[in-house]
Image: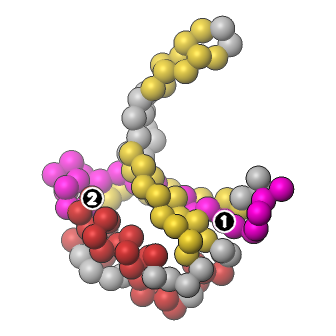
Amino acid sequence: MPLSDKYLLIISMDVEADKEALFNEVYDTEHIPAILKVPGVISVTRAKAVPFSIGIAGGVQDVPVGDNPMYTNIIEIESPDVLVTEEWAEAVQIGRWPDEVRPHTSNRNFALRKVIG
């Protein structure tokens, strides 16, 4: 049983190779700090895809990154309502993200998950 009702907003995307340094800088210094100020946002975790191997069914299976997006952000929120607030709308438009970074992203995926345990 979860300690409280929480949700995970999972946003994944690719970025053009020549914009990757800018992408990471803006995400870490501007975009995430702005999102963390939104009421109802609990935490933000960033991840980058890597190939791996896994033992399964008596063997080892290699798992490439494949067509999956390279970057994933997991944003823990109190409620889906957070995502339609004025504060959220303003936060995702702050700084260089909308004009200098977002246009260079692709393969964007959004998912919302309720934490159940």
The residues colored magenta run: 1-23
The answer to whether one can see residue 11 in this image is no
At horizontal 61% and vertical 62% (from top left) the residue drawn is 8
Residue 41 image position (x, y, % from top left): 55, 75
Image height of 71 relative to 50, above or below: below
Task: Depth check: give the residue in front, 58 or 109.
Answer: 58
The residue most toward the bottom is 86
Q: Which residue is mark 2?
A: 24
The answer to whether 80 appears left or right of 83 in the picture is right
Q: Is residue 16 magenta?
A: yes
Q: Secondary structure at mark 1?
A: strand
At horizontal 39% and vertical 79% (from top left) the residue drawn is 34
The answer to whether 18 appears left or right of 23 in the picture is left
Q: Secondary structure at mark 2?
A: helix
Q: Which residue is mark 1?
A: 7
Task: Depth check: give the residue in front, 39 or 56.
Answer: 39
Q: Is residue 105 magenta?
A: no
The answer to whether one can see residue 115 in this image is yes
Q: Are marks 2 and 1 in contact (CB under 8 Å)?
A: no
At horizontal 47% and vertical 58% (from top left) the residue drawn is 45
Image height of 22 relative to 99, above or below: above
Residue 114 image position (x, y, % from top left): 72, 61
The answer to whether 44 appears left or right of 101 in the picture is right
**Where, quadrant-wise, is the N terminus in this rendering?**
bottom right
Residue 93 image position (x, y, % from top left): 36, 82
At horizontal 60% and vertical 9% (from top left) the residue drawn is 59
The residue most toward the left is 18
- Tell me the distance, in whole angstroms, between the alpha carbons under discs 2 and 1: 24 Å
The answer to whether 92 appears left or right of 81 in the picture is left
